[in-house]
Amino acid sequence: MRIPPDRRAFLRTGGLAALAFGTGLGTSGTPAPGAGGTSGGAAGPHRGAGGTPGRASTRTGGAPRPADWRALAEGLEGSLVRPGDATYDRARRLFNPAFDAVRPAGVAYCADPSDVAECVGFARRLNVPLAVRSGGHSYAGWSTGTGLVVDVSRLNTVRHASGRATVGAGARLVDVYDRLAASGVSVPAGTCATVGVSGLALGGGIGVVSRRYGLTCDVMESVRIVTADGRLLTCDADHHPDLYWASRGGGGGNLGVAVSFEFRTHPAREVTVFFLHWPWSRAVRALRAWQAWAPSAPDAMWSGMHLSRDGGMDVQVVGLYLGGRDGCERLLDRLADAAGSPSSSLVRRTSYRQAMLTMAGCGSLSVGQCHLGGSLPGQTRGGRLSRDRFSAASHMAYRPLSEGGARTLVAQVARAGEHTVLLDALGGAVARVRPDATAFPHRAALYSVQYYAHRAGAATWTRTARAAMRPHFGDHAYVNYVDAGLSGWRSAYYGPNAARLARVKAAYDPGRLFRLPQGI
């Protein structure tokens, strides 16, 4: 779980400002056109210029010429943005300004699955590097590249019926929560409001109700994917089961372009949120107490510990309880018995939707405001969130830290700079799934660990901190916190599932059209 910029200030105040309840909640985002295609079939006729099917595919091989790009643009229901266009500088940006120097040859805003298939065919025939972008939050910047960026942000519909949610691959998490809340349901997902659901779900999807309802990929009942050969496949337990398996934790951008998902939902009732602080002098004790308490708490209790030197030294436990305040406080008393009484605490009952806004650092904003603003892709007219320059790395903790390990982690946070270590509790429903049942292998992990730093020296700190903790945590890492500098990444991300993932890749993308520096 990443800290959005607005959330950092909220964490430093213990959530008090963010818990200014009572703001009006609007909706945002433009519904995408209806998706076409059938299970196992083509994505529909490719639309060329003047309605001629396949005009963008009339030439094969060689670098694309201006006429090829024009034909691609004319074959899309959506739009193609190219260097020199008025909106190019906005279209090419990701969430992290560290990648602003990358200049794609084109950014295609796909309006439907046929647009995606048109782009995939264009890239395959003309050997154009392909990048897939949903929310544009790839930690390594792999949501962009020098070739064609396939942007699925316009595929953002969110519908609910009969306990199932159909969600477009480009839907932002804040909109998923908001639109499903209107039906009194939700899906387990993350906290960063502007993240696209696709990348989150394909890599696993750790969130604030995962201990009760599982990872996002655990409630994924089907996914529709445009594969390297241009087919639109509906994948589930009975249709293309290997690709379905690989799409539940194998990571985004590896096997095709996801265009929509069907998720099993859960009721979205009132919940209790809480924020506890301890002085820095008690960091080691609080850390050891939390790691003994959090992964073994009842499934209804989720919590995360933040050790931060971002605007001050801070030890905080933030969490959500799927129940009433009294039950929550009884469980928190057990933590306080081991960690010592917190220096400040805030426990409050609220709606599920408001809790998700609060966890995103948007507790005092409307849903429309909880989007990117300014000249950015994915912006909304009233969006108030901004981009964030950061560097990050991760571990998955399979065993608790010893006294020495806890002291080492606290010492790393205490080093000069602006950085945070975030520990998110696992266990519960996550641990009750076999490691090979989905591509996400870390079912036995007690918690995830994220090293997250800002501004000058950020990358140096994340590398150094992770290296210092390797003797204590080992080599396990989370693919959704992709780390371009990680050695042994295949085993770290996928463990024993790596071999099966490679076989699925060979079956569905034998020509390796979808290539990442750390690709399957």
Image (cartoon, rainbow, N blue to C red):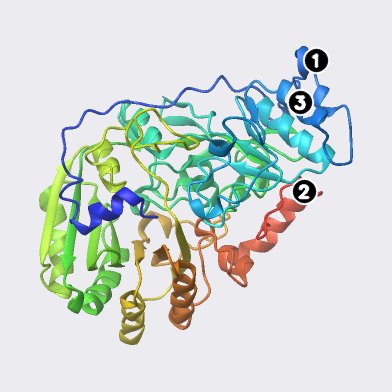
**Would residue 75 be visible to someone looking at this image?**
no
Q: Which residue is mark 3?
A: 70
Q: Alpha-carbon distance for marks 1 and 2?
A: 31 Å
Amino acid carrying mark 1 in the image: Thr
The residue carrying pointer 3 sits among few (fewer than 14), some (14 to 19) or many (20 or more) residues within 10 Å by Cα, namely: some
Q: Nearer the viewer, residue 36 or 49?
A: 49
User: Where is 404 relative to 45, above or below?
Assistant: below
Q: Alpha-carbon distance for marks 3 and 2?
A: 32 Å
User: Farthest bottom residue?
Assistant: 404
Left or right of residue 166: residue 119: right
Q: Disc 1 vs disc 3: Cβ atoms closer than 8 Å?
A: no
Q: Secondary structure at mark 1?
A: loop
User: Where is 451 relative to 254, above or below?
Assistant: below
Q: Which mark is residue 183?
A: none
Q: Which residue is mark 1?
A: 52
The residue carrying pointer 2 sits among few (fewer than 14), some (14 to 19) or many (20 or more) residues within 10 Å by Cα, namely: few
Left or right of residue 364: residue 393: right
Q: Of the residues tagged 3 and 2, which is closer to the observer?
A: 3
Which quadrant of the figure has residue 331?
Answer: bottom left
Q: Nearer the viewer, residue 459 or 89?
A: 89
**Would residue 411 be visible to someone looking at this image?**
yes
